[in-house]
Amino acid sequence: MNRVETAPLHLPDVSAAPPLALYVHWPFCVSKCPYCDFNSHVRASVDQAAWRAALLTDLAYEASLLPGRKLGSIFFGGGTPSLMPPETVAAIIAAAADAWGFADDIEITLEANPSSVEAARFAALALAGVNRVSLGLQALDDAALKFLGRAHDVHEGLAALETAQKAFGRVSFDLIYARPEQSLDAWDAELARAISFGTEHLSLYQLTIEPGTRFATEAAAGRLHIPGEDLGADLFEVTRSMTDAAGLPAYEISNHARPGAESRHNLSYWRYSDYAGIGPGAHGRRGGMATVRHKKPENWLSAISRNGQGIESTTKLSPGDRLTEAMLMGMRLREGLDLSRHFDTENPGLTQSLNQRALVTLEAQGLIARDGPRLRATDRGLPVLNAILAALLIDPA
């Protein structure tokens, strides 16, 4: 990729910086789902006291490098963080409050599986400080849940959803569509049922075959076939139309929310704000540096013991790298990306490293739109966003 290299970006005054986000990774699951390529592991036992202490140590290290910031969000992801003892969650929230202080409307999200065992912890997790839960329902069909390797059935999942709606002020849940042999009519009915439950947020993902997963092995052997591009595009269009009509418009490719109920934590990623990441495999971005924690749980624990933090690598991001990352994330949003917010003030020539010919062509085709410094994919462009980004970010010789 040919890019214009300019002087390094200067770090902004922290008093003017947006609130910081904190990501906490809990890597353990009861079982590994066949579609999942996240950093998740199955272990016979977990030393809860040791893990609590290690996470608090990792947090303290990040806090020492990000002084003077307020936290706008905390996100417990995984893995299956609803397997965490509520007292561990409470300890991390308290330590984060002591280290940074909270914005008045802080969002504290925890991903949860909809099993009855984990749902029984919801009240305790709410008392620990969690105010938003993201529930992994994944499907509203028992056969589909079995295919996806989920341990719950529809009845158990909906019971957990009801419990979550009583325990937390804000609730989201996930569904996976574009499953093998799923028709437009079947998805229409399933999505209508999902909308009827009245949550403020839905994450609706098309099934993709990720390298290294069991589904990838099945697909390579010819035993698994997901819908082709044409049906996938039709399913995507139906999804957006139905959620728009229900007052849950897509604010990102796969995320839909009532106005004001968007995930503030995820918006911090997509808007390319700073965030700290702790726990095995967690990524972070602070002050123009990208951090990656050791991925394997045992390696991360060893690094904490040796170094007082779990970092495997820290990389300085060039202005060109930052532009690429911001484009890859910001263009997923319906609002698009304000290039001037990140680059134009201190690097006025940087955005010229985008493929200017492609910009003109894509705009003429109605696939992207420009409003001053803001660049976004149109509704027509979102289904082919990967191709748009490839064209914009590769400057042909």
Image (tube, grey):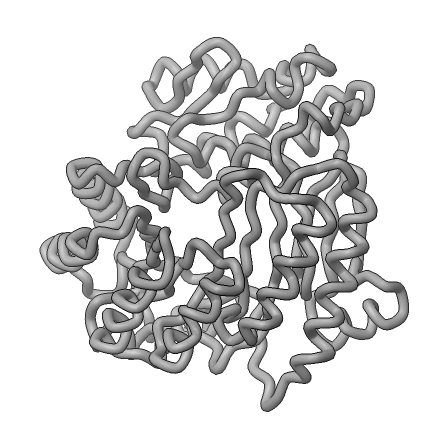
Residue 245, quarter of picture? top left
Residue lying at 89% horizontally and 64% vertically, measured from the top left:
307
Position of the C terminus by quadrant = top right
- Nearer the observer, 280 or 172: 172
Residue lying at 73% horizontally and 29% vertically, measured from the top left:
14
Q: Position of residue 325 (x, y in %)?
A: 61, 36
Q: Would you place residue 302 above or below residue 203 in this image? A: below
Residue lying at 41% horizontally and 58% vertically, measured from the top left:
133
Position of the N terminus by quadrant = top right
Q: Position of residue 119 (x, y in %)?
A: 37, 74
Residue lying at 36% horizontally and 35% vertically, measured from the top left:
260
Which residue ends up furthest to the right in the rendered image? 306
Is 28 on the left-hand or right-hand side of 388?
right
- Nearer the observer, 386 or 282: 282
- Nearer the observer, 56 or 149: 56
Q: Would you place residue 37 above or below residue 30 in this image? A: above
Which residue ends up furthest to the bottom in the rendered image? 44
Residue 171, quarter of picture? bottom left
Q: Would you place residue 339 above or below residue 18 in this image? A: above
Image label count: 0
Q: Would you place residue 182 above or below residue 345 in this image? A: below
Q: Position of residue 106 (x, y in %)?
A: 53, 44
Is 356 on the left-hand or right-hand side of 172?
right
Q: Position of residue 60 (x, y in %)?
A: 78, 56
